[in-house]
C-alpha cells in the first residue's frame, strides 16, 4: 500500500499509550566499532503520541557516551520555519493545474469525502501538488488522533543530546528532503495521491501495526511492511527514499568511522533495514554490526 511508503518517509506513528511505551519499548539500536571509533545506529519514528517515551535506558546511555549526534536534517525552530515555507513553495500547484485535474470525477468525489471526514473543506487542497496533498491526507488523521510531531523520536533525541552538550550534525538539508517528493514523476505523484485517498480511513489500523513493530524492535515485521512492500510496489519511491539517500549517508558514515570517537546516528528505522539499508551496507564493507539488546 502506498500509505506505507508515505509513512516510511514522513513518520512511523506509535499507537500505544505513553505508560505502556515507557515500560516496554525496545526500539532498534545497533552498534558498530573499529579500533578507535564507535557508532550507534538508532531507528526512529518521527511522530509519537504526546508524552510517549522515545527510547529506553540503553538509547539514553548511547547518546550520553557519544560526542556527535546525527539526525536526518537540522532540528530547530528556524529549520521548522524554513521547512514550512519551502513546503508551501514547492508544493504549490502549477498555474492551470489544480489538484482536481490530476483525478477522475470518481476520485475527486472520494477525495472530497475523505476531507469531509477529517473536517477539512473539500477545496482546501486544490492549490497543492499531488505529493504534498498525499502527505496531508496521511498526517492529518494522525494528528487528529492525538499524535504530536514535537513528540517525535528525532526531536526528543535532539533535545536530550543538546542538553548533554553534544555536537549536533545532519545528513541532509530540508531542500533535499522535500526535493525527493517534489521531483517525483507525474504518474508516481498521481498514484501516491490516489492511494492516500483510498487508505485514509484505514490509517489508524495501519499505524498500529507499524508502531507495534517499532516498539518491540521487530526487524522482520518492519522490513516487510516498510521495505519489501515499498520496493515491490513502488520501485521509484523506494529508490528515491531509501537507496539514493542511504548511499549518500553511507559516504558520511564511512568517513566518520575512518576517524575516531563515538557517534550516535538517529534516522528513520526503515533506513537501517533491508539489502540497501545502512546495517547491511556496513556489514558489506567488513564492519561488525551488533544489535544492542
Image: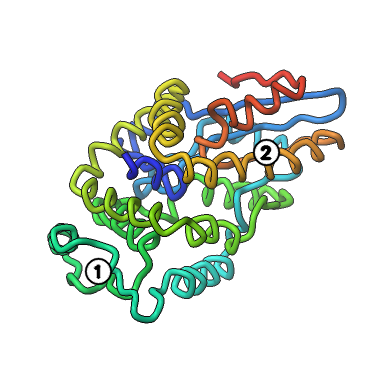
Whole-percent x, y for residue 25 in the image: 43, 29
How many numbered badges does the structure rendering display?
2
Q: Quadrant of residue 98?
A: bottom left
Residue 264: which disc? 2
Residue at the spot 59% in from the left edge and 47% down from the top edge: 160
Q: Secondary structure at mark 2?
A: strand
Q: Residues within 10 Å of mark 2 (few under 14, many from 20)?
A: many
Instruction: Name the N-terminal-most of marks 1 and 2.
Output: 1
Whole-percent x, y for residue 227 in the image: 46, 32
Q: Residues within 10 Å of mark 1 (few under 14, many from 20)?
A: some
Judging depth in this view, the residue of 6 and 239 nearest the camera is: 239
Q: Quadrant of residue 144?
A: bottom left
What's the colour scheme?
rainbow
Q: Quadrant of residue 242?
A: top right
Q: Is residue 27 left or right of residue 212?
A: right
Judging depth in this view, the residue of 228 and 257 nearest the camera is: 228
Residue 14: which disc? none
Question: Considering the image in quadrants, where does the C terminus appear?
Answer: top right
Contact flag, marks 1 and 2 (Cβ < 8 Å): no
Judging depth in this view, the residue of 206 and 35 nearest the camera is: 206
Whole-percent x, y for residue 151 in the image: 43, 50
Residue at the spot 58% in from the left edge and 70% down from the top edge: 78
Residue 100: which disc? 1
Q: Nearer the viewer, mark 1 or mark 2?
A: 1
Whole-percent x, y for residue 115 in the image: 19, 62
Amino acid at each position: 500500500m502506498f500509505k506505507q511508503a508515505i509513512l516510511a518517509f514522513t513518520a512511523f506513528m506509535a499507537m500505544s499509550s505513553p505508560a505502556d511505551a515507557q515500560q516496554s519499548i525496545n526500539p532498534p539500536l545497533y552498534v558498530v566499532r573499529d579500533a578507535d571509533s564507535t557508532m550507534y545506529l538508532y531507528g526512529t519514528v518521527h511522530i509519537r503520541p504526546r508524552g510517549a517515551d522515545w527510547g529506553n535506558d540503553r538509547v539514553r546511555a548511547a547518546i550520553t557516551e557519544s560526542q556527535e549526534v546525527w539526525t536526518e536534517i537540522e532540528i530547530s525552530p528556524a529549520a521548522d520555519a524554513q521547512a514550512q515555507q519551502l513546503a508551501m513553495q514547492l508544493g504549490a500547484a502549477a498555474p492551470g493545474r489544480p489538484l482536481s485535474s490530476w483525478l477522475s470525477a470518481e476520485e475527486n468525489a472520494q477525495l472530497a469525502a475523505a476531507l469531509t471526514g477529517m473536517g477539512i473543506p473539500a477545496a482546501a487542497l486544490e492549490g497543492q501538488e499531488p505529493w504534498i496533498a498525499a502527505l496531508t491526507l496521511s498526517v492529518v488523521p494522525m494528528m487528529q488522533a492525538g499524535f504530536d510531531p514535537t513528540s517525535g523520536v528525532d526531536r526528543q533525541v535532539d533535545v536530550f543530546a543538546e542538553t548533554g552538550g553534544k555536537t549536533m550534525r545532519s545528513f541532509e538539508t530540508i531542500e533535499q528532503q522535500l526535493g525527493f517528493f517534489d521531483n517525483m514523476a507525474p504518474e508516481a505523484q498521481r498514484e501516491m495521491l490516489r492511494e492516500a485517498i483510498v487508505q485514509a480511513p484505514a490509517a489508524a489500523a495501519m499505524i498500529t501495526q507499524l508502531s507495534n513493530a517499532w516498539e518491540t524492535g521487530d526487524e522482520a515485521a518492519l522490513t516487510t511492511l516498510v521495505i519489501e512492500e515499498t520496493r515491490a510496489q513502488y520501485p521509484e519511491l523506494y529508490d528515491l527514499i531509501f537507496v539514493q539517500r542511504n548511499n549518500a549517508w553511507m559516504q558520511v558514515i564511512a568517513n566518520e568511522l575512518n576517524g575516531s570517537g563515538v557517534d550516535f546516528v538517529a534516522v528513520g528505522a526503515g533506513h537501517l533495514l533491508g539489502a540497501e539499508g545502512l546495517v547491511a551496507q556496513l556489514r558489506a564493507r567488513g564492519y561488525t554490526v551488533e544489535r544492542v539488546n
